[in-house]
Amino acid sequence: MTTTRSASMSYTLDGPPEAPVLMFSNSLGTTMSLWESQARSLRSHYRILRYDTRGHGESPGVTAAGSLTLAQLGQDVVDLLDQLKLDKVNFCGISMGGIIGLWLGIYAADRVQRLVVANSAAKIGSEDGWRSRAEQIAENGMDGVADGAAGRWFTPEFITRTPILVDAMVSDLRHCSPRGYAACCMALADADLREEVVRIEAPTLIVAGRHDPVTTVSDARFLQERIADADYLELAASHLSNVEASDAFTAGLMKFLA
Ligand SMILES: O=C(O)CC1=CCC(=O)O1
């Protein structure tokens, strides 16, 4: 597996060249490494395309006082697919990656074969909440956000059971680009697809975490009720369900894509 950095996104593409492509999109404050477990299990069946969302990991950052929009984050995916000459892919995103997937299902429908939207919503959180998080970062850096991350991402049981993994993810968040993270907060502040999600025609799997305090089961049901061809999977997990319930997540993904 090699990671490629071009003028655009940092990405990895691995798996059998003739296999269908399965693209993964990370959540706010994580990188493509979030999908390690799924990539390991699925790379003999699929060509796995992972990338770091703009402002995260090795992908291009944002300029001072820069902010991003959901449309830019969605267009980054389309541009990467164009660059790789990939016509249509299966797309799986979690949280911010999930709302990027919804945007693609609406505005770049011809590029999406099947769509998986995990722990996400047509509108994530509140506009004020995202703006004040961006301001807090501008004033104090990443520490405040990182200090509360484990409790937003995982159940207390998972944090107790896997402290090394959780600490490593929180430490990565602490070292995430403050500008990149804050710019994505601003994209989420303005992102609202509640009216548009009815236009999604791709077969879609909505994944919810039963204990997710960020994007709730009712956010997931909202999507399932409005997307014409939507399946629903609820996992015993909090927000980062692909990590906390990795085996069940991967099994659900495989079943949906088969
Ligand atoms: O607030 C968090 O850390 C969780 C989250 C919200 C949107 C996202 O992508 O992650």
Image (cartoon, helix red, strand yellow):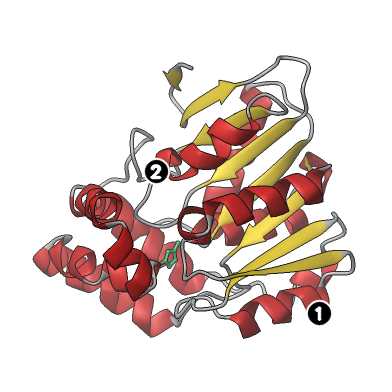
| Mark drawn on residue 31 | 2
- Percent x, y of residue 140: 10, 67
- Going by the numbered disc 2, the residue's amino acid type is Thr
Nearer the N terminus, badge 2 or badge 1? 2
- Percent x, y of residue 63: 28, 46
- Percent x, y of residue 224: 77, 74
Kindly state the secondary structure of the residue where label 2 is placed: loop
Residue sitting at x 80%, y 45%: 257
Is residue 224 something that shows in the picture? yes
> On the picture, is 214 further left or further right than 141?
right
Whether the residue under disc 2 has CB within 8 Å of ligand 1: no
Kindly state the secondary structure of the residue where label 1 is placed: helix
- Going by the numbered disc 1, the residue's amino acid type is Glu
> On the picture, is 170 further left or further right than 31?
left
Residue holding disc 1: 225
- Percent x, y of residue 118: 61, 61
